[in-house]
Amino acid sequence: MPPILLLSVLLASPAHDALWVEAPPHAPAVTLPSIAPIVDATLPALLEVRTAPAALPPGHPPIPGDDLRGEATGFVIHPSGLALTNQHVVGCEATVPVRVGTAPEAITARVLARDAAADLALLQLPPRDDPWPHLPLGDSTALRVGDFVVAVGNPFGLSHSVSLGILSGRDRPPERASEYAYLQTDAAINPGNSGGPILDLAGRVVGIATAIHRQGSGIGYAIPIDAVKLMLPGMKAQGRLVRGWLGVAIRDVARGVEIVRLDATGPAAQAGLKVGDVIRTFEGRPVDSTRTLQGFAGLGRPGNTVELHVARGEALEALPVTLGARPDPGDDTCPRRGFFDRMLDGLRPQ
């Protein structure tokens, strides 16, 4: 048998003691679509949000060729001109200059609402006769780790830059205490991408680019759009995010969180919860950590009644609780805007 034919036979028919199975030489490959149609549909609704010059942190090496003055990003979500960006982009300003799509001139957008903890700001573009181009919001919970995502923004003032990556993880970083956990992506996110859309391959917004890992490379974070949807009604109505409140102090235990202290006049106490109760679910969703419960309650609307499943001794009870409004700490300050001015538990806003 000729040597070449013998080699082909060996590759096609692995021996019983082979250590691996060789792939066929002409295995079908997955064909990836072009994301150009997504980009074409996104750019008309993309905002360039002008930012003030931002000082580098003390000791930070200079960035050649860039003075950190440039465009951050936002995007329009409604034909009336409602738009979103990060709070750390707009800071405490009442208005910000923006450029919509490829329009040559900047216009002034009003800041309708902002929340520093959520790092979210709601903008209003000026009224006009024609509807504003806008992006549809998708479903971030439907995304699977490994799904492709697209980031569009203005990194370092490079307008309308596009990067492609995947959803790398959820619930990031695990130690972050907030109403929601970030989505993680390896789609390139840099200073100037702040507030820009993260899209799925149907062109729907599934997240808002907001931060990168301080020491990491290819580790970017986005606010999940499902959390944003829960925040927007209250922000639009009241100019700020009013968080739901249970009035409990809790700690992590096996299969839930245990109530260790109750506000005597708080919603949980009024509903009959007791110290020692272990909260298992919130509106049917498993409660596996204190952060999870804080997120569920914080994103709930004050005045809404929710159902908690609570383990009390050997019994499991379903208790309705009407959420209160989290007491306002009375701190109206907000961080100054800029790319490098705020650090978030190992994260750097972008």
Image: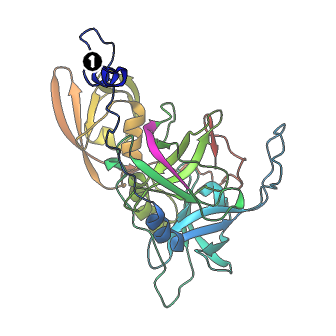
> Dividing the picture into quarters, in which one does residue 296 lie?
top left
Relative vertical location of residue 164 with respect to residue 348 in this rendering, above or below: below
Image location of residue 214, percent across then percent down: 65, 36
Q: Would residue 169 be counted in the magenta stretch? A: yes
Residue sitting farthest toward the front: 1
- Left or right of residue 212, residue 199 in this image: left
Magenta region = 163-171
Q: Main secondary structure of the magenta part?
A: strand
Residue in front for this viewpoint, 265 or 133:
133
Residue 114 visible in the picture: yes
Report if residue 263 is visible in the image: no
- In this rendering, would 282 be left or right of 195? left
Quadrant where the N terminus lies?
A: top left
| Residue 113: % across, % down | 54, 64
Q: Is residue 186 magenta?
A: no
Q: Position of residue 301 (x, y in %)?
A: 36, 55
Residue at image location 64% in from the left, 61% down from the top: 154
Residue count near mark 1 (Cα–Cα under 10 Å), binned few <14, some 14–19, many ≥20: few
Residue at position x 31%, y 23% from top?
A: 11
Q: Is residue 317 left or right of residue 91?
A: left
